[in-house]
């Protein structure tokens, strides 16, 4: 147990160092960046260790596992302010349930989802922050299992629908750099979409971008929220 704690302390310190140095290179302040540790496939005991070590934001990508983990961790009432992010693809029939425990949903990539999330949040009596997930242009859709995300041209329409929903708050935008693509070009493209969204909705300033392998490029392109899994928790035992 203690060795896992030490491992997480060391990994968090090295990620922090990368963030600080990327901020320095980009002429940005560390305070502009929120680290979200993506805990998918790892046990709730890891989430608890992270919270003890000062991590304020954690993310999961699969329902219902994410909800179970949330309940296990939050039951102790030790970290009432821990924020839960949902970053995975959302099936329409599960989206409703995610609004029960997610504080921020990063993966809103179609209009139909907005109505479902609004209903779920209303039923749960909660306000849920939503990000528009943008599919960047280098995605090769013909690859089948391609990453999801709205076309950049549709981002504003989805943003408007979120903003117009009583129980949803528009936070901003999110993207995953396409596999094999130049992450810098992808994140620069996301930044353009983010600019269009925040010009229309000035409070929607979140840019969720950057994972273990590309956080430097994301910070350079204006990311405000990093989603880091492996660099903190270690390689996942299976793809998730
Ligand atoms: C798993 C995942 C991450 C974290 O990726 P790492 O490479 O482990 O840092 C970030 N964003 C999403 C959407 C993910 O599914």
Image (cartoon, rainbow, N blue to C red):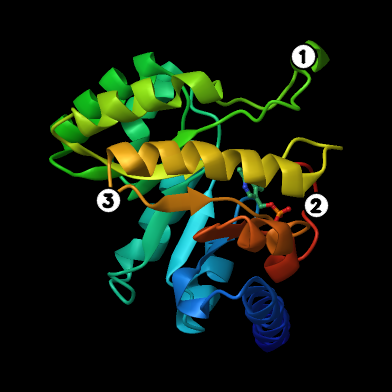
Q: Image check: 228 left or right of 156? A: right
**In the image shown, does 198 or 134 lie closer to the viewer?**
198
- Viewed as shown, does residue 1 lie left or right of 132? right
Q: Nearer the viewer, residue 223 or 191?
A: 191
Residue 211 occupies quadrant: bottom right
Q: Position of residue 108 (x, y in %)?
A: 43, 30
- The disc label shown at residue 144, or none: 1
Image quadrant in which you'd find residue 128: top left
Q: Earlier in the sequence, mark 3 or mark 1?
A: 1
Instruction: Say if mark 3 contacts mark 1, CB within 8 Å.
Output: no
Residue found 50% across the figure and 20% down from its top: 153
Q: Is residue 64 visible?
A: no
Judging by the rendered image, the residue that carries numbered circle 3 is 203
Mark 1 or mark 2: which is in front? 1
Q: Residues within 10 Å of mark 3 (few under 14, many from 20)?
A: few
Choose the circle earlier in sequence order: 1 or 2: 1
Q: Residues within 10 Å of mark 1 (few under 14, many from 20)?
A: few
Quarter of the picture containing the C terminus is top right
Tag 2 residue = 237
Q: Is residue 125 above or below residue 212?
A: above
x and y percent of residue 125 in the render? 12, 40
Compared across the picture, whether 236 is left or right of 75 comes to: right
């Amino acid at each position: 147990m203690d060795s896992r704690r030490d491992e997480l302390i060391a990994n968090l310190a090295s990620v922090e160092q990368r963030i600080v140095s990327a901020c320095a290179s980009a002429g940005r302040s560390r305070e502009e960046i929120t680290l979200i540790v993506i805990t998918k496939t790892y046990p709730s005991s890891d989430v608890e260790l992270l919270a003890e070590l000062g991590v304020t934001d954690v993310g999961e990508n699969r329902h219902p596992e994410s909800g179970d983990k949330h309940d296990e961790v939050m039951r102790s009432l030790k970290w009432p302010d821990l924020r839960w992010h949902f970053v995975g693809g959302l099936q329409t029939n599960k989206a409703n349930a995610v609004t029960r425990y997610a504080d921020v949903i990063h993966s809103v990539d179609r209009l139909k989802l907005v109505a479902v999330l609004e209903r779920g949040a209303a039923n749960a009596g909660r306000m849920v922050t939503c990000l528009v997930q943008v599919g960047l242009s280098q995605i090769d859709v013909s690859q089948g299992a391609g990453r999801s995300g709205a076309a950049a041209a549709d981002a504003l329409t989805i943003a408007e629908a979120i903003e117009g929903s009583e129980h949803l708050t528009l936070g901003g935008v999110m993207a995953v750099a396409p596999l094999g693509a130049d992450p810098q070009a992808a994140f620069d493209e996301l930044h353009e979409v983010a600019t269009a969204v925040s010009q229309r909705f000035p409070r929607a300033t979140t840019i969720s971008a950057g994972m273990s392998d590309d956080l430097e490029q994301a910070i350079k392109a204006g990311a405000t929220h990093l989603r880091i899994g492996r660099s903190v928790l270690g390689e996942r035992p299976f793809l998730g």
